Image: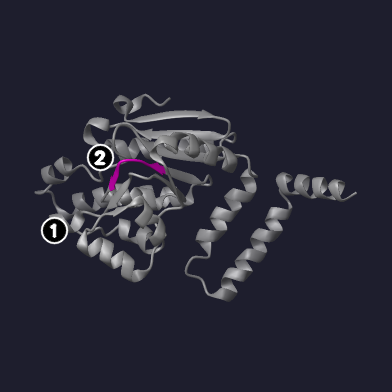
Amino acid sequence: MINGLDGLIQYASGAGVARVTLNRPEKRNALNRELIGALRGALERAAQDSSIRVILLRGAGRDFCAGMDLAGLAAGSESGVLDHLADARMVADLFLAMRRNPRPIVAAVHGRALAGGAGLASACDLVLAAKSAQFRYTEVDLGFVPAIVATALRRTVSEKHAFELLATGAGVNAEQALALGMINHVYPDAEFDDRVEEYVAALAGKSGTAVSLTKSLLYYIDGMTFESAVQAGVQTNALARMTPDARRGFEQFVQKKK
């Protein structure tokens, strides 16, 4: 477990899974500079650990994450543009680090995922939600713009759905989020923890190199022309053939055919 920064992040690993937990339950896991820094450190630790194949991101207490710590934003209302840019850059750098992390990051959302918390879930590669979970981009109600989180949401849902969610601040429940394509699976509250563990265990059982290369390729070709994306796939295909996991898999397949 990471105990730095007053335990803002809990970290545990085992069976190929790094379990990273936002640990500000008294603040509904609201994001401030310290928590963002601790989260980046935990994600980097998992990325550097060759035994880790999946990162599971959760929130302690009743909610997944309530977004940015508004007390901190209010305190900085008199700050200059460079200070505000630095704060915004911290969030942007976190999302970019998640995108570039070689491990698949799975968000397990219970309770509420609000504003930047909804964005944090969307920035993960996969999202599992308890049936009672709620997602809402509340920035507009404060006269604020969900400028950074919009990027992750827009790559997840259609343009019109993204605009409605961001411009109206309307909340959606887990079933609605599933229908919109915001999340991957919804599980009953009573079964949520067990189903999440089953899911990440199954993912951790897959080839680590194959999943990592798949994540890298998928995001690399985002925005490319069809021809460029296919050419990028050629490079990844050739590279994947040379990995120990693929060679072992090919050999096992041949042996079964015999």
Q: Secondary structure at mark 1?
A: loop
Residue found at x 31% / y 60%: 150
Residue labelled with disc 2: 30
- The picture places residue 132, in percent across and down from the top left corner, at 33, 44
Most extreme residue toward the left, as rendered?
Answer: 78
Disc nearer the start of the sequence (1/2)? 2
Q: Is residue 27 magenta?
A: no
Q: Is residue 205 visible?
A: yes
What amino acid type is highlighted by mark number 1? Gly
Q: Residues within 10 Å of mark 1 (few under 14, many from 20)?
A: few
Residue found at x 13% / y 58%: 143
Front residue (pair 230, 132): 132
CA gap between label 1 and label 2 equals 19 Å
Q: Main secondary structure of the magenta part?
A: strand
Q: Quadrant of the N terminus?
A: top left
Q: Which residues are magenta?
A: 108-113
What amino acid type is highlighted by mark number 2? Ala
Quarter of the image where one finds residue 187: top left
- The picture places residue 237, in percent across and down from the top left corner, at 68, 60
Residue labelled with disc 1: 143
- The picture places residue 232, in percent across and down from the top left corner, at 61, 66
Residue found at x 68% / y 56%: 239
Q: Is residue 90 visible?
A: no
Q: Secondary structure at mark 2?
A: loop
Front residue (pair 3, 152): 152
Q: Is residue 5 left or right of residue 257?
A: left
Label at residue 22: none
